[in-house]
Image (cartoon, rainbow, N blue to C red):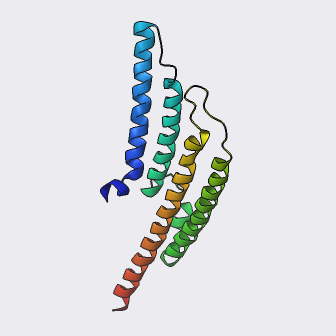
């Protein structure tokens, strides 16, 4: 369960570790022995792409993306929860649309990388995974916000 809870962080860490390791090894081999591993640059770029998208999903999960709270500070307390729910519903729709469009984009991926020969389907698949994860996180945000408001309203009525 802990693995699934931290899935984005684990996969992003693995991907960025491979990226850094490949770059260090390639630099060492280039300057130390005069040759390079031909596929290391492609693998580094692929892993970096995956690290970025899993990092985006992780930040979204932990609500670490920048936001503009000006509107929230101007709203009365009674309007803040409904406003948060409207924003969350908008983000849910947006993430579902982006996941759907990512499926189309990934399915159209017919090229392969020049050196490794890896299909772009594998590379672009991270879009589907991460936008889907962000939609799931948004559902959790909505559920938590509704649960917290139910708990708050039940404590105020008794």
Looking at the image, residue 148 lies above or below residue 4: below
Which of 25 and 84 lies nearest the eye of the viewer? 25
In percent of width and height, residue 113 lies at: 60, 31
In percent of width and height, residue 50 lies at: 50, 41
Looking at the image, residue 43 lies above or below residue 88: above
Q: Residue at x 49, y 30 (%)?
A: 44
> Would residue 45 appear left or right of 105 to someone viewing this image?
left
Which of 64 and 138 lies nearest the eye of the viewer? 138
The N terminus - image quarter:
bottom left
Q: Residue at x 64, y 60 (%)?
A: 97
Which of 130 and 82 lies nearest the eye of the viewer? 130
Q: Residue at x 41, y 7 (%)?
A: 33
The image quarter in which residue 28 lies: top left
In percent of width and height, residue 58 lies at: 44, 51
> Would residue 33 appear left or right of 97 to someone viewing this image?
left
In percent of width and height, residue 111 lies at: 66, 36
Q: From this viewpoint, which residue is outermost toward the bottom?
A: 158
The C terminus - image quarter:
bottom left
The image quarter in which residue 116 lies: top right
């Amino acid at each position: 369960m802990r693995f699934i809870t931290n899935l984005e962080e684990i996969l992003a860490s693995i991907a960025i570790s491979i990226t850094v390791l490949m770059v260090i090894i390639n630099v060492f081999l280039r300057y130390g022995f005069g040759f390079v591993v031909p596929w290391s640059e492609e693998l580094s770029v692929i892993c970096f792409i995956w690290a970025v998208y899993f990092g985006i999903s992780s930040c979204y999960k932990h609500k670490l993306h920048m936001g503009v709270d000006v509107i929230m500070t101007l709203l009365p307390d009674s309007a803040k929860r409904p406003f948060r729910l409207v924003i969350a519903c908008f983000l849910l729709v947006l993430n579902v649309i982006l996941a759907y469009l990512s499926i189309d984009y990934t399915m159209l991926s017919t090229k392969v990388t020049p050196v490794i020969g890896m299909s772009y389907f594998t590379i672009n698949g991270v879009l589907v995974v991460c936008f889907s994860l962000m939609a799931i996180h948004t559902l959790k945000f909505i559920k938590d916000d509704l649960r917290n408001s139910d708990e708050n309203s039940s404590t105020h009525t008794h």
